[in-house]
Image (tube, rainbow, N blue to C red):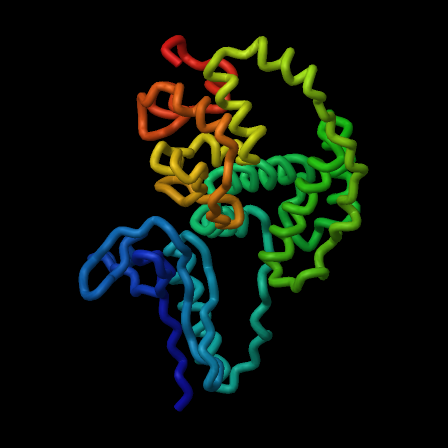
Amino acid sequence: MANRRASVWKYVKLGKCWRYCRPVIGKNNKIKPNWVIVNGRAEEHAEGNYYIHYLQGRKQVWKRIGKNPAQAMGAADFQEGYFDAVARGIPVKSEEKPPLMISRTLFGYLEEYRLSKRPDSYAMMRQNLNEFNAFTRKNVISDITRLDLLKYKAWLIEKGRSERTAGNKMLRVNQFLRAVQSLKPGEGLVTVKDAKSVELEPEVYNDEELKLFFKQCTPFQVAVFKTLLMSGLRKQELENLCWDDVDFVDGTLKVCAKRGFSPKTWEERTIEVPAKLLAILQKLPRRSQYVFANGPHITTASMLNPSPWC
């Protein structure tokens, strides 16, 4: 006899891995929200979604339901009823797949993005998708068209965003739409060509202009900008530079991952720097493990407006 059972599971993070776990069933015979069985013990896990599991022939099916445990139990009951009707020879309509909706997919997509990306990347994606959602006011994903994305880009430019920023924002929305629809690269509504913009030639200062610039800086600001100039560090790499990363003997700076920080594209590297820069760094007060500490840590504002003791 074919298996007609459909069971409810929750996909949760255990350490560095994700795993399907059985939900905890309460005395009222209902799922206790966010509680699952892990190695025989009940644990609370707010992350992840509920799934139902069943067999189609020899194929195992894991169907994502969402965050609501009641909906998961209802989906399992419906699936078992469907199997039972088919087994009894009762004519039934093939299971209709509900339309994908932003309201049902956005939270799960952003949660996976948060767990796998850098905090600043997650914040950027969250703002971007919420902004597009408010702009288009379309909830059914199949209703969103190529024209909607191009209009979104044009609207951003009208609001004062650069062509490059507007194009990148449009591509992030396209990335979300492709992901939730399981589309392959190139199958989205727009492509990189639709986001192309004219790159303005960067302004370059000559030696005389640099002298005038540094003359207006405090000693702390000189150290910040000289390090950026002579090492090529990115802003966050500079913010997270520790004294242990500076080798005054070999004349190098080390860019490496730390708690709460990882280099862009996970690119750890060692950079040779001139002795002139090392001399500037040696004059900085060591008030923290961070080279450019302003109180407990450096911030974007403190680069330009350091506290008096810096």
Residue 89 screen position, x and y as percent: 51, 86
Q: Residue at coordinates 79% horizontally, 39% vertically from top-left? A: 197
Q: Is residue 247 left or right of residue 126?
A: left
Foreground pick, 234 / 270: 270
Residue found 31% across the figure and 58% down from its top: 14
Q: Relative to the observer, which residue lies in front, 229 or 156? A: 229
Can residue 33 be seen at all in this image of the molecule? no
Q: Vertically, is 218 above or below 185?
A: above
Query: Where does residue 144 sit, x and y in percent of width and height?
Result: 71, 49
Pick out the residue farthest to the bottom: 1
| Total numbered labels | 0
Who is closer to the viewer here, 261 or 205? 205
Q: Quadrant of the C terminus?
A: top left
- Quadrant for residue 50, please give it: bottom left
**Where residue 15 sits: x, y (%)?**
30, 56
Q: Which residue: 41% across, 71% down?
A: 53
Tell me if residue 240 can be seen. Answer: yes
Q: Position of residue 126 (x, y in %)?
A: 54, 40
Q: Depth check: give the residue in front, 293 or 230.
A: 230
- In the displayed structure, 49 sits above or below 96; it is above
- In the rendered image of this protein, does residue 55 appear above or below residue 76? below
In the rendered image, the quadrant that contains the N terminus is: bottom left
Up-down relation of residue 287 to residue 76 (above or below): above
Question: Residue at the spot x=47%, y=81% of the render?
Answer: 59
